[in-house]
Each structure stands twice: as structure tokens, then as C-alpha cells.
Image: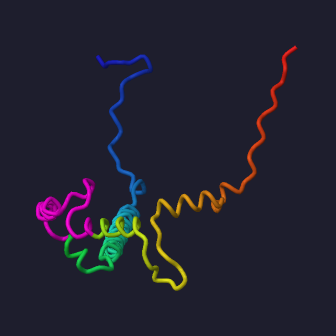
Amino acid sequence: MTETDRAGPATSPPGIRRERGDENFRTILLTAAILVGTCVAVLLAMVWMLDYFQHREEVDKRGTFPLATQENQEPLDQRLKQLSDSAPLLEGLQGPAHLSQLAEQQRLQEFGPSPEKGFARIPIELAMQRMLEKHRFPVQSAPEPKPPKKEERP
């Protein structure tokens, strides 16, 4: 007996066929070639840009003082050792710089001739006192502010 299905008697499947127009290998290969070419072009452009920026940065970092650039190329431990061997930067001056400041402070406290003709050097404290007495500072010439009026409450 033959098997029947609800729709009717069973039939054998049709022959397997292949449609020749479904894919176009030439179009697929052309699309893949364009994609690969675009990726290669983008990568080459990126390599060129990175090389350009690296060269520009090297030119900017060179510096105008060759000794400073040479010192910056030394290893970090040698640069730190040079800093530790030098005088402390924030703890006061030592050596010749300190002596020159002492000489300058002493010169500001003495009477003496001035390098400009017609002038004499006087101690700085005395000069400031005389300037205050003669009202030579612009702040002193400003009119004094009037005191605010007091309003009486009823």
C-alpha cells in the first residue's frame, strides 16, 4: 500500500538543480579586492602620518640650547645625582650667591656716592621714611573716603 498524506499521494522529490545566476564570482572578487586595497591605503596613510608627527615632535623637542638637550639625554639617576650634589634650592643660598646678596643688603643700609651724577645713596629705611613724609606714593595722594552716615532707627 502506498502511503498517502493528507494532501494526497506522496511523490518523489524533484531533481536537485542549481541556478547559475545566483552568485557572480567576478563581483565578489572585485569587491574583496577593493576592500583590501582600501585597507592597505588607509594603513599606508596612517604610517605616513605617524612618521610625520614623530619627526615634527623630534624637531620640537630638540631645544635651542645644545647643552640642555645633552643633559636631558643623560640617564635619570645621573641627573638626580647632579641635583642632590648641588646646593638646596629652597633652603636659602650658599656660597658666592649668598655673599653677593649680603653685599647688596649692606649697600642698601649705607650712605655713599651714587653712580648717577647729582645723586647720593642713603639707607633704604631712611629713604622710605622720607618718601612717606613727603607723600610721594600714589596711594597717599588719593582722597580719604568719607565715613558712612549712620542712620537712626525710629
Residue 73, located in which quarter of the rendered image? Answer: bottom left
Instruction: Farthest residue to the top: give it.
Output: 154
Instruction: List x then y, in percent, for residue 22.
Output: 41, 53
Residue visible at 43% across and 71% down in the picture: 111
Residue 78 visible in the snapshot: yes
* Position of residue 88 in the picture relative to residue 143 (left or right): left
The residue nearer to you, when weighing 61 against 101, is 101
Instruction: Farthest residue to the bottom: give it.
Output: 117
Instruction: List x then y, in percent, for residue 92.
Output: 26, 56
Instruction: List x then y, in percent, for residue 149.
Output: 82, 31
Instruction: List x then y, in percent, for residue 96.
Output: 22, 70
Residue visible at 64% across and 61% down in the picture: 134
Quadrant containing the N terminus in the rendered view: top left
The residue nearer to you, when weighing 82 against 86, is 86
Q: Which residues are magenta?
A: 73-99
Identify whether 144 is placed above or below 96.
above
Residue 68, located in which quarter of the rendered image? Answer: bottom left
Please give the count of numbered marks on the rendered protein.
Answer: 0
Identify whether 18 is placed above or below 4.
below
Quadrant containing the C terminus in the rendered view: top right
The residue nearer to you, when weighing 1 against 53, is 53
Residue 109, located in which quarter of the rendered image? Answer: bottom left
Residue 44 visible in the snapshot: no
Residue visible at 33% across and 42% down in the picture: 15
